[in-house]
Amino acid sequence: MVTSQAINLPAQLRVNPEQFGQFTQANPELRMELTAQGKIIVMSPTGSEGGSRNAEASADIVIWNRQTGLGKVFDSSSGFQLPNGAIRSPDTAWIAKGRWDALTPEQRRGFAPICPDFVLELASESDAVSVLQSKMREYVENGARLGWLIVPKAGWAEIYRGDQSVERLDKPKTLSGETVLPGFLFPVETIFWS
């Protein structure tokens, strides 16, 4: 019988991506990220309402992607090794087909060494918004072309773009995939503000 138990990591502990991969394989029940500085972050599960909202958002992107065939969609259990060495797991990610196809089969099996073209982070009740904003900037600095940070509790969304601009929208009805997810219009109002 498997039981869960808390883990405590020393604040000064730093690991490299290879060690992190070994740690995640030894602890598959944990959802973790690795910062560029080598610090392991163990993340708590999302609440039920947040998980449902995230599934809705991912489903819309999956449906759009199936219709267009332009890339690959990933859920929050997927980790990506960014150029700065961090291993991050956005709530939803999308990578253009050509970029994904350029990876070797071995690279695809592990934490793919690539920054997604699009990332979505959904703030749950326990998330510090400032931490999520920092992650969004990190994605853009490492090659993401478009990102959405949605904060249902506060009633706003931020759009992050590859040119480093950030735009905040109060209770937008929709969010556009712009040129990154061409033709995709996300009905954020029906999922997050109702």
Image (tube, grey):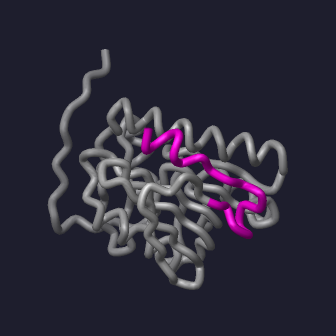
Quarter holding residue 83:
bottom right
Does the segment drawn in magenta span residue 182? yes
Q: Position of residue 4 (x, y in %)?
A: 25, 28
**Extent of the magenta region:** 176-194
Relative depth, front residue between 12 and 57: 57
Of the 4 image quadrants, the one containing the C terminus is top left
Please, is residue 169 above or below residue 61 in the view?
below
Relative depth, front residue between 13 and 186: 186
In the rendered structure, the answer to whether residue 48 lies left or right of residue 189 reads left
Please, is residue 35 above or below residue 68 in the view?
below
Quarter holding residue 151:
bottom left
Does the segment drawn in magenta span residue 128? no
In the rendered structure, the answer to whether residue 79 lies left or right of residue 183 reads left
Q: Position of residue 10 (x, y in %)?
A: 15, 59
* Residue located at (47% from left, 77% from top): 166
* Residue located at (35% from left, 40% from top): 30
Please, is residue 91 above or below residue 34 in the view?
above
* Residue located at (44% from left, 75% from top): 137
Please, is residue 48 above or below residue 137 in the view?
above
Of the 4 image quadrants, the one containing the N terminus is top left
In the rendered structure, the answer to whether residue 115 lies left or right of residue 152 reads right
Q: Position of residue 133 (x, y in %)?
A: 37, 68
Q: Position of residue 19 (x, y in %)?
A: 40, 59
* Residue located at (33% from left, 74% from top): 37
Q: Name, please, the residue furthest toward the top.
A: 1
Q: Could you tell me how many numbered marks the image carries?
A: 0
